[in-house]
Amino acid sequence: MKVLIVEDEKNIRESLVSSFKSQGFATESASDGVDGLYIAQEYPIDIAIVDIGLPGISGLKLIETLRADGIQIPIIVLTARDSWQDKVEGLSTGADDYMAKPFQFEELLARCNALLRRTAGFATPKIKFADIELDTMAQLVNKEGKNIELTAYEYKVIEYLFMNPKKVVSKTELTEHIYDQDFDRDSNVLEVFIGRLRKKIDPEQTVKLIQTQRGKGYRLNPDYIAN
């Protein structure tokens, strides 16, 4: 699961990023509304934590724009102003829940998990590309009715590519996605994962599923067909 944290107060933002990572979440973060909106529109996000009083564009405007674009990820609003007017305005704009600062991370985490459970029934757990299907709930990869055994990191790589099927994903972006903690982010290791995936998913490699775009990154091959 990936959480987006949009918060202009650096100490709060960094604390939340660290706390969510310790609970096994992948994270994206932004210090203003403009960057937060871009991340929410361009990257696969499961839930967002958005402060109301953001520079650039306000948290309320960010949420309003996402909802107008049809992006229905769960959103929790944060505000330092504990008034019923702010709560009503945030929820009316499209937020799913509300928390006033200061708050305990444990309560925020519990609310996030509750929203994720509530929305899980409406999510699409399976992603298909040609003859390959990913079950994102079970974290399984299936080809022609047979499961393909992948390591946890190999699965993270293929899942991210499947969630961005028309995009060239840079090595930096892909590396930041698969390493949720502060591991050694060696791009050579990423190349090893890609090589293993190619062999496991398409041993013949007549038409490679994963293409290398020199100087840019990786993408799913639009010419790959079921075989």
Image (spheres, rainbow, N blue to C red):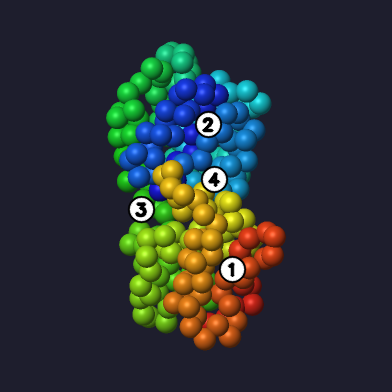
Which residue is label 2 attached to? 6
Residue 68 lies in quadrant: top right
Q: In the rendered image, which residue does mark 3 sit on? A: 121
Q: Which residue is drawn at 47% across and 71% down?
A: 197
Left or right? Give the position of 170 relative to 100. right
Q: Residues within 10 Å of mark 1 (few under 14, many from 20)?
A: many
Say above or below: 132 vs 121. Answer: below
Q: Distance between the residues labelled 2 and 1?
A: 30 Å
Q: State which tag comes first along the sequence, 3 or 1.
A: 3
Residue at the right extreme of this rendering: 215
Secondary element type, mark 4:
loop
At 30% from the left and 28% from the top, the residue drawn is 107
Give the percent coordinates (x, y) of residue 62. Answer: 59, 32
Q: Is residue 95 in sight in this rendering?
A: no
User: How busy is the neighbourhood of tag 2: few (under 14 within 10 Å), some, or many (20 plus)?
Assistant: many
Q: Give the residue number, with chain letter if any, for mark 1.
A: 220
Q: Please tell me whether residue 89 is drawn above or below residue 64 in the rendered image.
A: above
Task: State the CA–CA distance, disc 1 to disc 4.
Answer: 24 Å
Three-letter residue code for mark 2: Val
Pair 1/4: label in front: 1
Instruction: Indicate the amino acid at tag 4.
Output: Ile
Q: In this view, does 7 lie to the left or right of 115?
A: right
Depth check, mark 2 against mark 4: the one in front is 2
x then y, percent, for residue 198: 51, 75
Give 134 or 152, whichever is nearer the viewer: 152
In the depicted structure, whether residue 50 falls above or below residue 117: above
Mark 3 against mark 1, which lies toward the viewer?
1
Q: How far apart are marks 3 and 4 (CA)?
A: 16 Å
Q: Nearer the viewer, mark 2 or mark 3?
A: 2
